[in-house]
Image (cartoon, rainbow, N blue to C red):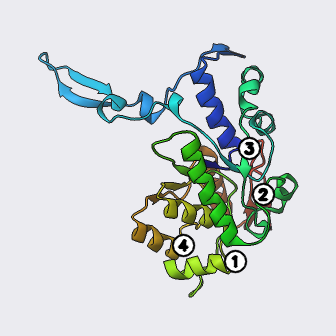
Amino acid sequence: MLVGLGGNNGTTLVATVLANRHNISWGTRDGIQTPNYLGSLVRASTMRLGVDDNGDDVYVPLSDVLPMVHPNDLVVGGWDISALPLDGAMRRAKVLEYDLQRQLAPLMAEYKPLPSIYYPTFINANQGERADNVIPGQDKQAHLDQVRRDIREFKQQNDLDQVIVLWTANTERYSRLIDGVNDTAENLLRSIEQSHDEVSPSTIFAVASILEGVPYINGAPNNTFVPGAIELAEQKKAFIAGDDFKSGQTKVKSVLAEYLVNAGIKVRVVAASERERVPVRLR
């Protein structure tokens, strides 16, 4: 289950699985492209077992040694603050080739995001215009309870062995670390009950995952895992991980920002548009 299902990452992941599952080839400037999982850890990586009688190295697919779910068998769903079905979200993202989008559109249209959590103070104001699919109200305990229900229903409806929740939504501002608010598991749960301002959407999703016993992976540079969330995961023996995807774009921005700072130019903000441009505002 992806938080940010209708974003660039979410639509590309769903499109990848569908193109491979339905063997959809598409035209590009360089010719016909066929779907594959080249570069995928679970399908393409190999490991060395040893040598044969002739002294030659023997390699086998990693997926044959460590049994893994084939990507084509993944069931993908999740939440987004935009209600746009994934065919429209895919067109909005402008990541995939037109011919692939055209063929995938009927399949992608079947995917509709669940309402997500929207706290305007945690993300860029320009996201407000697309926030038409949010869990109503300001009660953060109610939001937590709804996300937990969504996880349980998704697992039950799809007859799944395991659910994994992955944050691939907007990067949030950092939550302030405040004693008595998010420093312990008990205080964090109380702060959610009281709808404290410094409880972020990503922390709500993380806590929901922890309480439901499903792994939670953070794919953005948020401080989702405040001390109280870490303590709660330890208490529940839940798996939490991640502090960013560290994508190529992230690395480029990091290097560019460091270069400018070293040149005496103070960077105020680095932000990428949906077309993956990297505008930089300077003081």
> In the rendered structure, which disc, 2 or 3, sits on the residue that comes first in sequence?
2
Determine whether the residue tagged by mark 3 lies in a helix, strand or loop. Answer: loop
Q: Which residue is mark 4?
A: 226
Q: Which residue is mark 1?
A: 195
Q: Residue at x 61, y 30 (%)?
A: 16
- Which marked residue is nearer to the observer: mark 1 or mark 3? 1
On the question of residue 268 being in view, the answer is yes
- Which marked residue is nearer to the observer: mark 4 or mark 2? 2
> In the rendered structure, which disc, 3 or 4, sits on the residue that comes first in sequence?
4
- Which marked residue is nearer to the observer: mark 3 or mark 4? 4
Disc ID at residue 134: 2
> In the rendered structure, which disc, 4 or 2, sits on the residue that comes first in sequence?
2
Q: Which residue is mark 3?
A: 276
23 to 221, vertically: above or below: above
Residues under labels 3 and 4: Cα distance? 29 Å
Mark 1 crowdedness (10 Å alpha carbons): few <14, some 14-19, many ≥20: some
